[in-house]
Image: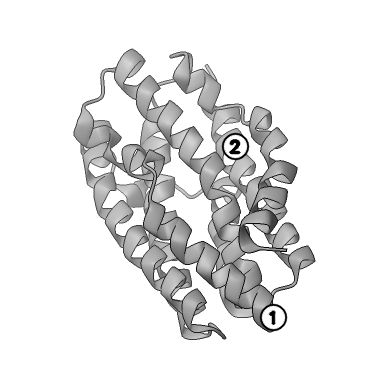
């Protein structure tokens, strides 16, 4: 099995769950309460900071150089995404420290931190990257809805635009790391599937926690 084949199988397994996201369609249709964007900013402010630390930890204990390159690239991306939240925070008002974290939103970075301490590098790479396509689609729909129905400008939408964009270099690094893990026998495909499934579950928990609060 090649890295591309493994990723295709994993993404085919988790892709049908996209329909379970309850918040993104509401934003895309302009039916979510406007307060959801302040909550998104506050929660993502915490998540990007946590994931930045987790990526560095994953890189530090990576058992293969190509996995280390992948995690280092993601760490840089998380730091950039964290800064891009400034536009949304400015548009929505609250200081990110004033909105209490929601357990359903912070389960995702908690699992990422668990991976940083416990999971083999190859399975972590596959699990993390397999969820990127779904997250990118969610972010593209949110950014479009923000502009069309809520009047947000480019600065406010920059965080979502960033994750909606295709990044071929990240895909190249992921495939190289997964291929190396398969070649040396350190990547367990079953564990990669499990990581991806849990990531998608926690991803949906994030959006649906906010849907329950701001569904309109």
In the drawing, does residue 135 fall left or right of residue 12? left
Q: According to the image, label 2 marks what residue?
A: 209
Between residues 104 and 7, which one lies in front from this camera angle?
Answer: 7
Find disc 1 in the rendering and name its residue. 186
Q: Secondary structure at mark 2?
A: helix
Residue at 52% across, 16% down: 216
| Quadrant housing residue 158 | top left
Outermost residue, right side: 190
Label 1 Cα neighbours within 10 Å, binned few <14 / some 14-19 / many ≥20: some
**Residue shown at the point (71%, 42%) measured from the top left:** 12
Q: Would residue 99 be visible to someone looking at this image?
A: no
**Residue 150 position in % (x across, y down):** 32, 18
Q: Residue at x 39, y 72 (%)?
A: 72
65, 207: nearer the viewer: 65
For the residues marked 1 and 2, what is the alpha-carbon distance in whole angstroms?
Answer: 36 Å
Is 215 left, or right, of 202 in this rendering?
Answer: left
Query: Quick check: marks 1 and 2 in contact, CB under 8 Å?
Result: no
Position of 149 compared to 139: left or right? left
| Point 68% across, 46% down: residue | 201
């Amino acid at each position: 099995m090649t890295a591309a084949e493994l990723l295709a199988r994993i993404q085919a397994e988790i892709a049908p769950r996209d329909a379970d996201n309850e918040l993104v369609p509401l934003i895309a249709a302009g039916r979510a309460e406007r307060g959801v964007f302040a909550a998104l900013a506050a929660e993502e402010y915490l998540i990007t900071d946590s994931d930045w630390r987790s990526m560095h930890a994953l890189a530090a204990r990576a058992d293969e150089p190509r996995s280390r390159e992948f995690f280092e690239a993601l760490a840089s991306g998380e730091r950039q995404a964290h800064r891009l939240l400034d536009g949304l925070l400015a548009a929505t008002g609250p200081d990110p420290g004033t909105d209490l974290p929601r357990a359903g939103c912070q389960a995702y970075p908690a699992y990422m931190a668990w991976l940083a301490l416990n999971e083999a590098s190859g399975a972590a790479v596959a699990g993390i990257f397999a969820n990127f396509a779904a997250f990118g689609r969610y972010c593209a729909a949110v950014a479009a809805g923000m502009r069309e129905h809520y009047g947000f400008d480019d600065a406010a939408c920059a965080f979502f635009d960033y994750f909606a964009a295709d990044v071929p270099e990240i895909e190249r690094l992921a495939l190289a790391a997964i291929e190396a893990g398969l070649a040396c026998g350190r990547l367990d495909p079953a564990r990669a599937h499990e990581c991806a499934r849990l990531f998608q579950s926690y991803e949906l928990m994030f959006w649906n926690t906010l849907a329950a609060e701001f569904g309109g």
